[in-house]
DNA sequence: CGTTGGGTTGAGCTTGTTCAACCACCGTGG
DNA sequence: CCACGGTGGTTGAACAAGCTCAACCCAACG
């Protein structure tokens, strides 16, 4: 056996880039020691903005963990209308939880995206074999069900301005959770993406932003928002923050 | 040891009513042999129409499996608006999947309801210890996430008539799945409950029913509906049933 | 320097809400 | 037995919210 430090076999199985990965402490990777990192890691892939990671109805492909960028998961109606169900942020795993047999939804890179790529069968077996990982998957599933339900209540009951307020609060929480700047928030989403997420038209989203500015609840440009009055926004959004 | 066939201890631990339970073949109970039925069974409870099984924010109580009747799970805004997130039918388990620490939502009996009652810790431990049961719980969770997502797309994208059409298709599928009469469907839900589920007002639901009748897609009374043209309804509902 | 892709804003229209009247059904009590 | 009130459903008319279509703005970029 060769002792050369970079034989092709060694390059394949050793030295994963995990130690410098910005999301090594997120989700499934959080409890991994170097040995398990090496066992689980396979490869990475980058996706251009607008590129589709998987399409509804297609047979299942690999499991993807987002390293950088944002993925929108959506359902599309035959006539082209689409509902963005969720935005996946760095650290999250997409194309896994919401799958049974085939993809039910569509995953699209909303920004430039970099992902870790795992063979599905291997990933499933590995997470099933390790209790701590299985528990993380389960907890994520429960939390996704909760936020989908909450989102449901927003779409069903809130007016357009209320929905945008709720969205901004949600976005802030998400940024905070991922250690990103929250004052101001960078808005990596177009008005159209926000509209498709909130079940309204982009013009209505734009008007809602204008209203919130006029009410001095936010300051906003095309790509940045500052939440000036978080409690005010939250109460608009119907969050019953009982103190 | 007494040989008397009905000592109090024996009454407590033996002879669960499972053999005659109408939902013994549903969900978690499906793979149970008599021994496991005896181990898992605790007791039953009935709830009057309108009674609240649990409230958002309360500490967790027991896990409930519905034997007969329908439970509506909803989120309520501070100002009283409510969104019915899901209807739970006989065989389903409620107050379990969507919980983390405390109840996030509210469960209310929409009809007279009979349930099996399981101590939560015991239930959790038992299902975790049996692989087949754990798998059923996991699959249910995934399927609930899928249907919540789909419901989200309906609320976000469909018009009022389309939503009612989608709801009727869904209801029919649900009845079929539970072996209930589907022609005509009995409608155990008030117009108000349907409205709260679809994010509209009861008057709008009523008008949508009238429109669907005029289009001869359905026949309906207060408490019964017949779906005359299922494909027609489905296409209204935006179901891309590719043949 | 023109073109292109978002974003904003206005005017008119459509859809769904609000408020109110009315109806059918059902159980209760005179 | 019938009058009564209550509950849930339907329908209409006026109104409001959000959508459509179109003009316009601005910054980025070839």
Image (cartoon, coloured by chain):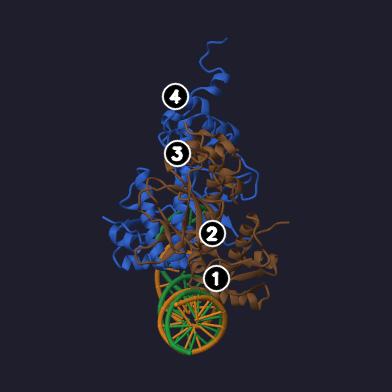
Chain colours: A brown, B blue, C green, D orange
Give the SS element for disc 2. loop
Instruction: Identify residue for label 4.
Output: B34
* Extreme residue toward the left, this view: B243
Circles 1 and 3: CB atoms closer than 8 Å = no
* Residue A51 picture quarter: bottom left
Closer to the observer: label 4 or label 1? 1
Mark seen at residue B189: none
Crowding at dot 4, Cα within 10 Å, few <14 / some 14-19 / many 20+, comes out as few
- Say above or below: B51 vs B219: above
Q: CA distance from mark 1 to mark 2?
A: 27 Å
Q: CA distance from mark 4 to mark 2?
A: 52 Å
Mark seen at residue A69: 2
Crowding at dot 2, Cα within 10 Å, few <14 / some 14-19 / many 20+, comes out as many
Give the SS element for disc 3. helix
Observer-nearest residue: A73 or B218?
A73
Label 2 vs 3, first from the N-terminus: 2
> Do discs 1 and 3 share a chain?
yes
Give the SS element for disc 4. helix
Closer to the observer: label 1 or label 2? 2
Circles 4 and 1: CB atoms closer than 8 Å = no
Instruction: Identify residue for label 3.
Output: A122
Closer to the observer: label 4 or label 3? 3
Label 1 vs 3, first from the N-terminus: 3
- Say above or below: A48 vs A228: above
Crowding at dot 3, Cα within 10 Å, few <14 / some 14-19 / many 20+, comes out as few
Observer-nearest residue: B24 or C23?
B24
| Spot occupied by residue A58 in the image (x, y as percentages of width and height) | 35, 52
Q: CA distance from mark 4 to mark 3?
A: 36 Å
Instruction: Identify residue for label 1.
Output: A160
Residue visible at 44% across and 24% down in the picture? B34
Q: CA distance from mark 1 to mark 3?
A: 44 Å
């Amino acid at each position: 056996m060769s002792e050369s430090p970079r034989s092709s076999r060694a390059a394949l199985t050793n030295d994963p880039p995990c130690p410098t990965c910005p999301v090594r402490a997120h989700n499934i990777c959080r409890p991994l020691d170097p040995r398990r990192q090496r066992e689980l890691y396979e490869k990475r892939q980058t996706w251009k903005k607008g590129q589709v990671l998987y399409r509804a109805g297609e047979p299942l492909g690999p499991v993807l963990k987002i390293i950088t960028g944002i993925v929108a998961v959506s359902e599309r109606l035959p006539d082209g209308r689409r509902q963005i169900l969720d935005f996946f942020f760095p650290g999250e795993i997409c194309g896994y939880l919401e799958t049974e047999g085939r993809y039910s939804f569509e995953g699209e890179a909303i920004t430039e995206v970099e992902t870790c790529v795992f063979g599905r069968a291997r990933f499933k077996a590995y997470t099933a074999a390790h209790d701590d990982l299985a528990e993380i998957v389960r907890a994520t599933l429960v939390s996704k069900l909760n936020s989908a339900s909450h989102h449901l209540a927003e779409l069903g009951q809130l007016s357009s301005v209320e929905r945008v307020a709720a969205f901004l609060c949600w976005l802030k929480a998400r940024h905070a959770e991922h250690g990103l700047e929250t004052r101001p928030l960078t808005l990596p989403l177009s008005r159209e993406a926000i509209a498709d997420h909130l079940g309204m038209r982009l013009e209505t989203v734009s008007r809602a932003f204008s209203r919130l500015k006029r009410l001095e609840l936010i300051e906003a440009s095309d790509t940045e928002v500052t939440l000036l009055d978080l409690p005010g926004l939250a109460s608009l959004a119907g969050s019953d923050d009982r103190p």
